[in-house]
Amino acid sequence: MRKQKRSMQKMIIAVMVIGSFLFGSCSKTEFTEAGKNDSPITSGADGENRDHSANGLPQETDSRLEVHFMDVGQGDATLISCDGYYMLIDAGNNDKGTAVWSYLKQQGVERLDYVIGTHPDADHIGGLDVVLYKFDCGTVIMPEVENDTRTYEDVVQAMEEKEYPVTCPVVGETYSLGEASFTVIAPNKDYGLDMNASSVGILVEHGENRFLLTGDAEEEGEEDILENGIDISADVYKAGHHGSKTASTEEFLNAVNPEYAVISCGEGNSYGHPHAEVLNRFRSMGIDVFRTDEQGTVVAVSDGREITWNCTPSESWQAGEPTGSSAGQNTEEKMVYITKTGEKYHREDCSYLKNGVEKISLFEAKERGYEPCKKCEPPVE
Ligand SMILES: [Zn+2]
Ligand SMILES: [Zn+2]
């Protein structure tokens, strides 16, 4: 089925390539605002007649796309390079900024054409301030959601000092990165203070190869991506929310239908990522899995047709085990309450809770640096 679909795409691309030679229209723009009149850029939900004209590669090309899923422990940092252009998506936790910077230097990065901070959680934007200070950065894309944390303030300060404007993600907009391009697929609405749901999601295309990255989007975010109608089928899927069972729903996976999945998580992380449910879904769909907790930095290279990897897929199918405060039954479902401006988390009936109350998991509250309220004494683990 997949093979059939692929060869059909090849035919379509061949026809388009010949067409573009005939009409001599292959000029590339630095930035294409796709779908002003006819968004989204990709056609039909059936995925059979994708419009690859934006990035259809000539038959003979030495264009090379590299996607580095960096090992930053529990967190995300992905470097994408294409033909001398660079993009960084997230930069790991606060203590990873320098490691990310030196990895980028090793890779020969001098300027980042794009920087995406998927959402203001510490395991994604923690190291971003270092990167923003150290590199000359082009377009910096971040969602319109603020976090009441020191980590987020550090990023805002770096942006101000370097005088970088924030570019807000607009679903359907396409940007070029050398011969490759990427399209914003999320966030699809205002999710209030739900950081994970606000994650910037992108689909990277290089010739026939497609990579989908959704940050920490969970079930609701995935549903909204499905609803926006953009074709999200991809060869490589970066498992949402570090392989948590709150993401990578069956419906979503069916739409992505990837050949490979990459899980970015830390060895022995306290959340138990990746969760067995997600690994089982991947396994039953015959998806090859790579994971940074077992394999370190995972690198995929695309020549526009084939994807090769720096390591062989993981065979362990080993789910993480929640430890410490995350261990035990049902702790994952423990929910607490926060407000827009407060620094504490509360029980539902706490009298300190007033307007703009948000229900989040205890894990998320702790991840985001909230302290337990002294009045209502909510659970601490
Ligand atoms: Zn995360
Ligand atoms: Zn998050």
Image: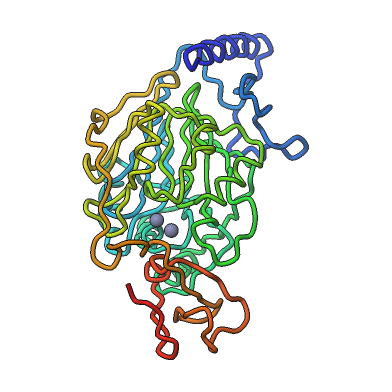
* Residue at x 36%, y 54% (from the top left corner): 91
Residue 198 position, x and y percent, is 55, 57
In-front residue for pair 152/106: 152
Query: With 178 as the anchor, is 78 left or right in this view?
Result: left
Q: Which residue appears farthest toward the right when viewing the image?
A: 37
Q: Nearer the viewer, residue 330 or 303?
A: 330
**Is any part of residue 123 visible from this angle?**
yes
Q: Would you say 26 lies left or right of 372 here? A: right
Q: Could one spot residue 180 in this view of the protein?
A: no
Is 370 situated left or right of 108 in this image?
Answer: right
Reply above or below: 197 against 343. Answer: above
Residue in front for this viewpoint, 131 or 343: 343
> Where does residue 373 sit, x and y in percent of width and height?
42, 85
Q: Is 269 drawn above or below residue 310 in the view shown?
A: below
Q: Residue at 61% of width from left, 40% of height from top? A: 226
Please report the residue visible at 65 percent of the width from the left and 11 percent of the height from the top: 19
Residue 356, relative to residue 143: is it above or below? Answer: below
Q: Quadrant of the C terminus?
A: bottom left
How many numbered marks have been drawn onto this rendered protein structure? 0
Q: How is the image coloured?
A: rainbow
User: Residue 281 at x, y = what percent?
Assistant: 40, 36
| Picture quadrant of ligand 1 | bottom left
Q: Quadrant of residue 64?
A: top left
> Relative to 328, does residue 204 appear above or below in the rendering?
above
Residue 316 percent across, percent down from the top left: 22, 36
Depth order, front residue of 200/165? 200
Residue under the image location 24 percent in, 66 percent down = 324
